[in-house]
Amino acid sequence: MGFRRFLRRGRIDAERALEMRAHLDHYADDLIAAGWTKDAACREARRRFGNPTAIREEIYDMNSLPILETLARDLRYGFRMLRKTPGFTIAAALTLALGIGANTAVFSVVNALLLEPLPFPHPDRLAFLERHFRSPRGESRDIGADGQMWLTVRDHATAVDAAAIGGTSGVNLVANDQAAYVQQQRVSAGYFHAVGIPPVIGREFTKDEDREGGAPVVVLGHELWTRVFGSDPSVLNRTITLKGEAYTVVGVLPENFPITQRSSFTAGHGIDLWTPLKASTTGEGGGTNFVVIARLHDGVSWAEARSDVMRLAEQAFVRWRLRPDTLKELSFVPMQGAMTQSVRQPLLMLWGAVGIVLLIACVNIAGLLLARGSTRTREIATRMALGSGRRAVIRQLLVESALLAMAGGVLGLLFGWLAVSFLGRLGADVFDVWQPIGVNGRVVAATLGIALVTSVVFGLVPAVQTSRLDVQAGLAKTGTRGVAGASSRWPRRVLVLAEVALGVVLLVGAGLLIRTFIHLRDLSPGFDETNLVTMSVSLQDARYKETAQVSGLFEDALRRLRAVPGVVNAGVALGMPYTRLLNYGFRRIDGAHVDGEREGQITNQSYVTPGFFETLKVPVLEGRTIAESDTATSAGVAVVNRAFAEAYYKGDPRVIGRHISSGGTVREIVGIVGNTQQGEAGWAPDGVVTGPLTALPCAYVPVTQTSPGFLRLVHTWFQPSWVVRTTMPIEQVVPELRRAIQDVDPRLPIATVSTIGDLRGNRLAAQQFMMSLVAGLGFIALALSAIGIHGLIASSVTERTRELGIRLALGATTRQAMHAVALPGIALAAVGVAIGAAGAVAVARLLRSFLWGVTPTDPGTFAGVIGVLLAVATLASVVPALRVLRLDPAQTLRAE
Amino acid sequence: MTLKKRAAQELLQGTLDMLVLQTLRLGPAHGYTIARVIEQRSDAVLQVEQGSLYPALNRLEDRGWIASYWATSENNRRARYYKLTASGRRQLSEETSRWDRMVRAIGRVMRAIEE
């Protein structure tokens, strides 16, 4: 029968009715014409015609599609059944929605950051230059390049278009009479050509502009061009003041130009403008401060590109002083893999966690469907007794679980969409997100796939089990007459067991991450954290080339800041607590350890002004701090912290009075101060494991005793900060503080204003992100496990009503009856917890790199998780068992 | 419904379909006319229950052998008229020849027993 007639069968039926009516009328007309009375004619016509209703039904059936008919009936019936048990329906749909939603969200992030190709043309042809050292002591691979490596590749590589990226940092822009703090990235000539996205207006840098002394030119980002220059195309060749100098605009980039380099300085910032790298082999180029990217020429294979660059290794590493048995190699690694390196591990971990949640959700759904199957034994037995086939019963149950899955899937997508937008915003502060995170087609397909598989697989198990049922026994027992221990409960018990075990694994992971976060949060800061505000500025500025200009700015501003009402004290430092410090070399000249003329140590260094330690209230352990009397002309001094003394003067009876040489200046150590917590990527002596926060060794020098070259170098990476201790509420004092600095230099924009708490928060954002997510997932797992156990016990009480009634009638106490019902749940949970704990020991090992101040087998965490799960399991078992109290034995027996 | 009964009904249906198509070869007609023509041309031997005509019409229309439209009848009443389509004409000639073959075959069988 045609589908068209199926859809039109209602209208066809109405037409048939009219048509048959006309038939009868015509017949009656003829009979009346032949002399019949009207009544007799009508009667005769109807007699000869037969039953019109029966005929219409016959035609209606002819125009039907049997499969669709039954499906529609099953759907209607399914809806009715789901509506009749709202508790089950809501629990199941929410369970699925949580599982699917969490999965959608995390998969969206994984997809955007790991699976999607980088947002450049032909991203598979893009590479990073990698240096590779091998020696009998081990091997290392790193992406950083120094000036010599870059210049060698630039001038001699033939198989690729290469370009280099330097540091990204905040700089001062003065345009349209307004000073602004913007993010600058320095790139070599050919960079935009290599990545494959040229400027939309103007051009990129020429080789002439990209060398020391080359013309100062700038390429603007689309966003800055729109925001500051009103999308004016005539901005080309205009002069803007950047870093205190005149720069000529030569190009504007297209919208959403993607970044190609992760940097510990820029996470969370976009880049506003680009200037030429002007690489050399000294200063910045003396260290591995560049990243070299390359685009393989058309038709060049990766092997050819690698061997092309391999032959340059000798020349590229000519400045490296390595032991002779070290094998030095240059190579290319695909950009996609290298860029995702840093986010891969945390993302895969999240994916694992969310996978566990989905598994638990599926297990729960299976449990709920099993329970539903057993409570519907009587209904199904009745249907089968009335002639319903086994296939029909299975089909009906499958349609019901498919309905559930669809409801869960739709809810889950909604929930996932909300979570994605939340994660996208949160993640942008933590990861460099190089493309927008959104729910895309692949994610939707994956999600619907999960919903469907869940529905079919877990809908089928109970369906087959239920329909295998013995009709007679089903009708006779009706589920309430059996004695405990029906074998049909075993599958559910296994499911609950699995659920609890998986929950333990996830909760232990969450617990360890929470412990880590608490450990980091509660680390002794080493100073008084309260009532401190910091304000940073960029001094990568032509107006601050000389040491006297820099120290003059600091002093003038400090004088004004100290005069602001409510300000107790103020100081300046290159690096604040909780931030990353400058890694810098020095030599020990005297004492128990002396470094040779060509040797040296690397440590962390910061310049400070008088008042810095006093403002922070860092304890002075020995000697003195930096004073006003430490000037450009007085003898060189340094203050070190305890970690420094312990790392570099171990066994030396005294540290005060020893001399170090750094940056060509000899300094006497005049004081030892307490340690402060510093951020990751600071230099740690051998054997010290650094976490996101560590009390790193540090040498502090007076800003007055630094060289202009040193300042120019460090100011390309770091923005110095004033730190102010105040007795006033912070939001009230900040405008005053801003004005004090603006008074000294109106063309110097404030880069950031933060409290010390903000600085710590930034540093711990990644940990907090991971912790909140995993803890949230752990909570979902716990809730789902509780639902699972509760459901199991509740249905066993229902199934055993009769048995319990008889037990009570025969003299069992309610206490005994409750024990009989609730104990299996608690016992199951205990076994599940034991299995889960064993699994958690294995899984926690994988977490090692995320843990600080807590071991993967932390007994406290394990004990806590086990305790919480057992408590929840007990509660989930006892609450439904309380129904036994309401059981009336007399009524139960009368119901026979 | 048993298989036997079903086969019998199908045979009957096939015959009725053929009669309806044959009737419509004379020109478009509505249900009552078709029923009357079948009765009259068979000299009132084939007196089917008139209602059973309609499932047959529905089936024939679904197969595309006839088409229908509403028009005013000779009695000045609205009625649904049916007419043969091209494929209906082809179907009729096929059925007619098959019917002829069958009648001849049955005729030969019947004669053989008589002699």
Image: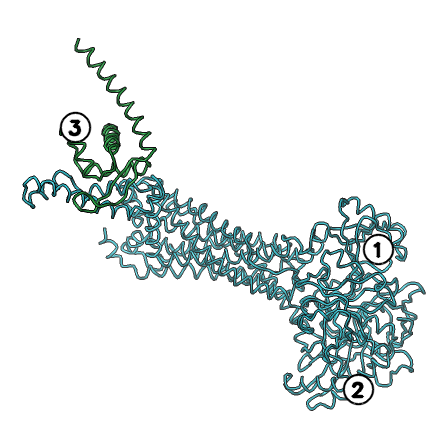
A391 shown above or below A99? above
Q: Nearer the viewer, mark 2 or mark 3?
A: 3
SS at mark 1 in the image: helix
Which residue type carries mark 1? Arg
| One can see residue A390 in this view | yes
Confirm whether circles 2 and 3 share one chain.
Answer: no
By what rule are the colours in the image chosen? Answer: by chain
Q: Quadrant of residue A428?
A: bottom right
Kindly indicate which chain is depicted in green in the rendered structure.
Answer: B
The disc labelled 2 sits on which kind of residue?
Answer: Asp
Residue pictured at 75% horizontal, 51% vertical? A333
Amino acid beneath label 3: Ser
Cα distance in 3D space between marks 2 and 3: 124 Å
Q: Colour of chain A?
A: cyan
- Residue where numbered disc 3 is placed: B42
Q: Which residue is mark 1?
A: A154
Labels 3 and 1 in the same subunit: no
Q: Residue furthest right?
A: A597
- Quarter of image, res B73: top left
User: In the depicted view, which residue is nearer to us: A400 or A121?
Assistant: A121
Residue A650 appears in the rendering: no
Q: Residue drawn at (78%, 44%), measured in percent from left and top?
A: A303
Across and down, in percent, residue A419 comes to 54, 62
Q: Disc 2 vs disc 3: Cβ atoms closer than 8 Å? A: no
Q: Residue at x 25, y 16 (%)?
A: B105
Q: Position of residue A630 (x, y in %)?
A: 87, 83
Q: Nearer the viewer, residue A800 or A105?
A: A105
Gap in Å between the C-alphas at discs 1 and 2? 45 Å
